[in-house]
Amino acid sequence: MKPKVAFFDFASCEGCQLAVLNCEDVFLNILELVDIVEFREAMSETAPRFDVAFIEGSIHREQDVQRLQDIRARSTVLVAMGACACMGNVQARSNFIAPAQNFQWVYGEAERNSLQTDPEFWPLWAHTRVRAVKEIVAVDFELRGCPMVPEEFVHLVKSLVIGSTPHFPANAVCVECKMDENECVFDHGETCMGPITYGGCKAVCVTGGYRCDGCRGLLPHAHREAHRWLLKEKGLSDAHIDNRYRLFCSTQFQGREKP
């Protein structure tokens, strides 16, 4: 029997699931290897148990925690898919703001006073902090990025099907910039998160004329102190540097994950 695969979404834009569907050239080949039994973006069927569960999205509420724990109990392998699931993504920036203040900024003072007593909106008011999937349950593999890289998804699925361990090198984005012969943005007066960020994206942002903002997360061996010194040398204040780190990597920046 082919492995049963399921996809689940929490707080996210669901862009990673769309990236899976956009693997048009290989998607049909994937379907020959696995049975997709749950995938809200593509089907309505559900299943009691599955071999591999892909989780997209960050965790905000206790009801999300319970749902995630149930999915983990029903799956053999669990994969965090995308920056939201792997590290909370941009929504985790709210962790640095008091829940009441965050609620007021979103809904306004008048709406806050009325909505906070409405049972329908109580989950919003009761929200405490954004968490990555691995802060709640055990995660077997991570597909990094915003969105995740389709080639890495295909590599992971094929590896699991044949019983091997998928390998994702812990190289910085700078390695891929050099391979693509990109000029370093630091040499043009710009600043970049590439030296401390997981590669695997083919340096797509820098190659496209932008910079790396760190959507794939901080490398485990990242030399943050040296990187901060480099950013300060380019004129960034401590507050500005903190904002750059928190854009995608808030949960790592808060120290809940070892550097």
Image (spheres, grey):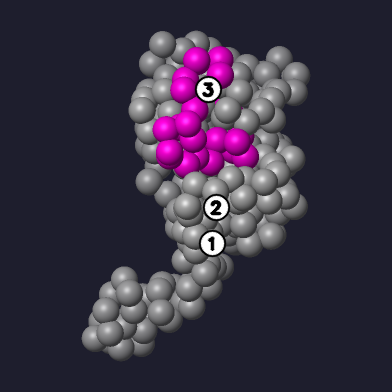
Nearest the viewer among 62 and 76 is 62
Q: Would you name the residue on which mark 2 appears?
A: 232
Residue at which label 3 appears: 177
Is residue 79 found inside the magenta-colored segment of the image? no
Depth check, mark 1 against mark 2: the one in front is: 2
Amino acid type of the residue that numbered disc 2 sits on in the rendered structure: Lys
Q: Nearer the viewer, mark 2 or mark 3?
A: 2
What kind of element bears circle 1?
helix
Q: Which residue is mark 1?
A: 238
User: Which residue is nearer to you in this view: 219 or 186?
Assistant: 186
Dot 2: what SS? helix
- Viewer can see residue 7: no
Q: Main secondary structure of the magenta part?
A: loop
In the image: residue 191, left or right of residue 158 = left
Crowd rating for badge 3 (residues with CA inside 10 Å; few <14, some 14–19, many 20+): many
Where is residue 178? Give x, y as percent. 56, 19
Above or below, 96 against 177 in this view is below
Few, some or many residues within 10 Å of mark 2 (<14, 14–19, 20+):
some
Looking at the rendering, the stretch of residues picked out in magenta corresponds to 178-200
Q: Quadrant of residue 171?
A: top right
In primary-sequence order, the first of circles 1 and 2 is: 2
Q: Are marks 1 and 2 in contact (CB under 8 Å)?
A: yes
> Magenta stretch containing residue 193, yes or no?
yes
